[in-house]
Image (cartoon, rainbow, N blue to C red):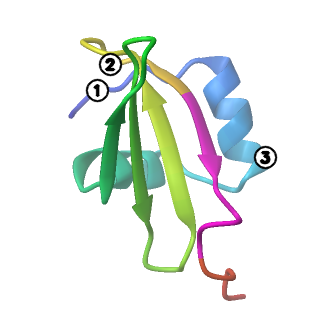
């Protein structure tokens, strides 16, 4: 999926969890899990190479990122 639209809310969430646009694209392009929500949105999740388990929610049929977060309960402890 190319050319995602990342609104301010998603950018704020990315900044809070130290995630980059490259991380978001990595999750959406090569996800471990994909779940369609009842709202019609699609949730993509992937464990990145550094152990973070990142979730990206996108409006179904669109390219708008709704939100992004690092699921700290699911991923391995981040290496420093």
Q: Secondary structure at mark 2?
A: loop
Q: Position of residue 75 (x, y in %)?
A: 59, 72
Q: Quadrant of the C terminus?
A: bottom right
The numbered disc on residue 16 is 3
The 10 Å Cα crowd at callout 1, few under 14, some 14 to 19, many 20 or more, is few
Q: Which residue is mark 1?
A: 3
How far across and how far down the image is residue 63, in percent? Answer: 32, 18
Q: Is residue 70 magenta?
A: yes
Label 2–label 3 contact, CB within 8 A: no
Q: Residue at x 67, y 88 (%)?
A: 79
Check if mark 2's residue and mark 1's residue have beta carbons within 8 Å: yes
Name the residue at the front extreme.
Answer: 38
Q: Outermost residue toward the right? A: 16
Please, what secondary structure does the residue beneath circle 3 have? helix
Q: Secondary structure under badge 1?
A: loop
Q: Is residue 7 above or below residue 34?
A: above
The segment highlighted magenta reads 67-75
Is label 3 or label 1 in front? 3
Indicate which disc, 2 or 1, sits on the residue closer to the N terminus.
1
C-alpha distance separating marks 2 and 1:
7 Å
What residue lies at 37% left-to-right and 13% top-to-bottom?
A: 40
- Name the image quarter holding residue 7: top right
Estimate the spatial distance between the alpha carbons at disc 2 and disc 3, rounded to whole Å: 22 Å
Residue occupied by mark 2? 63
At a point 61% along the width and 53% down the height, the residue shown is: 19
Between the C-alphas of marks 3 and 1, the distance is: 22 Å
Instruction: Name the quadrant of the N terminus.
Output: top left
């Amino acid at each position: 999926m190319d050319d995602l639209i990342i609104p301010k809310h998603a950018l704020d969430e990315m900044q809070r969890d130290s995630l980059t646009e490259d991380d978001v694209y990595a999750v959406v392009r090569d996800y471990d899990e994909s779940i369609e929500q009842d709202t019609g949105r699609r949730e993509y999740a992937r464990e990145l190479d550094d152990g973070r388990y990142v979730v990206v929610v996108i409006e179904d049929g669109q390219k708008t990122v709704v939100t992004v977060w690092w699921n700290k309960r699911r991923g391995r402890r981040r290496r420093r």
